[in-house]
Amino acid sequence: MKSMIRMLLLGGACGLAISGAASAADLGAIPLRGAVGMWSGLYAGVNGGYSWNENDAIVFSSSVGIRPNPNGSVFGGQVGYNWQWTPDWVFGVETDLDWADIKGGVKTPGFVAVEEINNLGTARLRAGYVLEGVLLYATAGLAYGRAEVDTSITNLFAGRTCAPAGFCGAVNSKQWMLGWAAGVGFDWSFLPRWSFRTEYLHYDLGSISQTLTDPGLPNFSFTSSTNFRGDIVRGAINYKFW
């Protein structure tokens, strides 16, 4: 439900940007397209937003799944370069790196799981269509991040006891991961060198698998697996150097 609401908000914002520029063009206030070179140049700025994932579960031994629903804030910076080839089209490259506090955890009888992403970055291509003062674009490329997952099994099979009567195990994993990201957005040039952005991104960093063992049961183990992916809505301010 939360993801649907955020998608509707983003779609509404894009729709307002398009309709506003088109209405102004109909009134003769501004031309539909800007001059070639209006968006060209090197830029940098800061961004901040919110990330969530309501779908993926941490799965134990391919049979028991629990959903930590990680969510949280992101904040960082980006740098990029645009080429406005024609009055209509802009192509560019961009890289960003965000501090992230994307975290979720859940505890059920016998199973505990916590996952988080501490840093998240991308390196993407962008292709956009120009309206006067507004650049509508799609983007896709690489994503990377530092992820962590803690899973444990407590008192499984035997009430409050562990091996040899029951099973207990815990494991922690931390690693940098590489995947992909794609999304859409729009930039609004509100001053000659300044622009404001609203952007939606989906990212997928891949999965981490773990093996949980109990010293009292060396020949018996459980596995766990979780995907690190989610959605981001964020805003940004950029300054164009030339």
Image: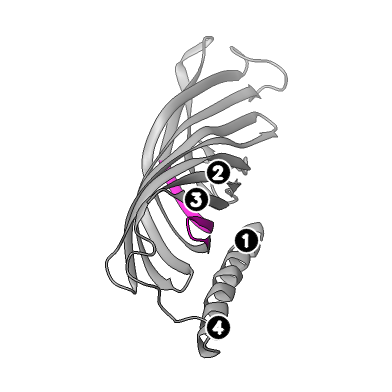
User: Pointer 3 and pointer 2: residues touching (CB < 8 Å)?
Assistant: no
Nearer-N-terminus badge (3/4): 4
Residue 39 point in image, percent of width and height: 38, 62
Few, some or many C-alpha atoms within 10 Å of disc 1 (few <14, some 14-19, many ≥20)?
some
Q: Secondary structure at mark 2?
A: loop
Q: Which mark is residue 6?
A: 1
**Horizontal placement of 162 versus 120: left or right?**
right
- Mark 4 lies on a secondary structure that is helix
**Residue at label 2?**
57
> Which of the two discs, 4 and 2, sits closer to the camera?
4
Disc 4 and disc 2 in contact, CB within 8 angstroms? no
Q: Earlier in the sequence, mark 2 or mark 1?
A: 1
Q: Residue at x 50, y 45 (%)?
A: 45
Q: Which of pointers 3 and 2 indicates the residue nearer the eye?
A: 3
Mark 2 vs 1: CB contact within 8 A: no
Amino acid type, residue under disc 2 in the picture = Ala
Q: Which residues are magenta?
A: 191-205
Q: Is residue 199 magenta?
A: yes
Question: Residue 92 at x, y = what percent?
Answer: 33, 56
Looking at the rendered structure, which numbered label has been put on residue 238? 3
**Position above or below: 220 against 108:** above
Coordinates of residue 100 in the picture (x, y in percent): 56, 36
Viewer-nearest residue: 47 or 213 = 47
Instruction: Give me the disc on residue 24.
Output: 4
Q: What is the distance, in whole Å, between disc 4 and disc 2 at their CAs? A: 47 Å
* Residue 178 vertical position relative to residue 23 in the rendered view, above or below: above
Q: Secondary structure at mark 3?
A: strand
Q: Nearer the viewer, residue 240 or 103?
A: 240
